[in-house]
Amino acid sequence: MAYGAKGAEPIEPIKAAKPQNPALVELGKKLYFDPRLSKSGFISCNSCHNLSMGGTDNLKSSIGHNWQQGPINSPTVLNSSMNVAQFWDGRAADLKAQAGGPIANPGEMASTHALAIEVLQSIPGYVSDFKKTFGSDKVDIDKVTKAIAAFEETLVTPNSRFDKWLAGDKKAITAFELEGYKLFKDSGCVACHNGPAVGGNSFQKMGVVEPYKASSPAEGRVAVTGKDADRFTFKVPTLRNVEMTYPYFHDGAAATLKDAVDVMGRLQLGKKFSDDENAKIVAFLKTLTGDMPSFKMPILPPSTDATPRPQPFGG
């Protein structure tokens, strides 16, 4: 079938989000941006998954509570609802399961679920929001993570130039970019990077043809399954908006797309791309940048004298 023909391509267009419960999404948005879920009162979900930076923080690994350097690169939250699981090692089955992790992680937000709920329950604006959304003014971690996940499900990026090409607009990408896509397919990249998110739907070993010398202590799926065969196996990252989500890989070792393409070619495919081939693939990858989520920043409910005080960094 011809390139661009419906059903012929391994990559599928992203569909726009259609929220089923706007009130739940709005509550989740407030919680996503609220640093009071952290022990210090300084770190929010958006700190490491910044929606103005492609859903990442553009650091090799994130900075957590008390300026701790994390062990792994923050994956983008954009289009994360399409992932087979969450986190690089897939330890969370879905966005709801993932949302509670950083809150209680001592190296990230460093709070506890009990303290985070105590803080939210003490803020009248949140109590009102939870009652409006859930029919009860009782705040609990299940409702908190459900709301954050509902907001994150809306963070999709449709309407990329490549999506327009898939829909039949032959002028949406250049001949140079199209050559990059053909190389991307013919070289075997699409074996792992396929579907609407161009990845995120499988786990693969990092370093198939050549071993990967990681700069991070993270060892992948083995931490979840306990199986040695899963050592250095990680969730395949999405390539949507990849020009924005540098640095690359679970350890953030590749600073540029050119570096990432070179490493992936050699280690995963046993192929050394020429400078021209590399440039074409990079050009194609940049066509995967879609429309960023559009919304008004939330006005967070104000604290009261009864709100538990955060513990500053170093405390």
Image (cartoon, rainbow, N blue to C red):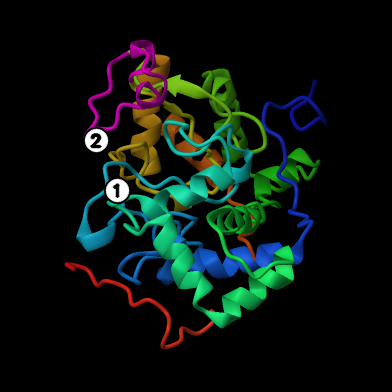
Residue 81: x and y in percent read: 62, 44
Residue 239: where, in percent of width, then height?
53, 39
Magenta stretch, main secondary structure class: loop
**Residue 194 horizontal/vertical position (percent):** 62, 29
Residue at figure coordinates x 60%, y 75% from the top left: 127
Residue 270 in sight here: yes
Judge by depth and name the residue closer to the eye, 152 or 269: 152
Q: Circle 2 sits on which residue?
A: 216
Q: Position of residue 217 (x, y in %)?
A: 23, 33
Disc 2 vs disc 1: Cβ atoms closer than 8 Å? yes
Closer to the camera, 26 or 174?
A: 26
- Give the residue at mark 1: 61
Quadrant position of residue 135: bottom right
At label 1, counting other C-alpha atoms closer than 10 Å, the crowd grade (few under 14, some 14-19, many 20 or more) is many
Which quadrant holds residue 165? top right
Q: Is residue 259 left or right of residue 291?
A: left
Q: Amino acid at mark 2?
A: Ser
Residue at 77%, 60% (x, y): give it.
Answer: 21
Residue at the limit of the structure toward the left, as seen here: 314
The region drawn magenta spans 210-231
Residues packed near mark 2 inside 10 Å, few (<14), some (14 to 19) or many (20 plus): some
Name the one closer to the observer, 142 or 45.
142
Q: Quadrant of the N terminus?
A: top right
Q: Amino acid at mark 1?
A: Ser
Q: Residue at x 30, y 38 (%)?
A: 251
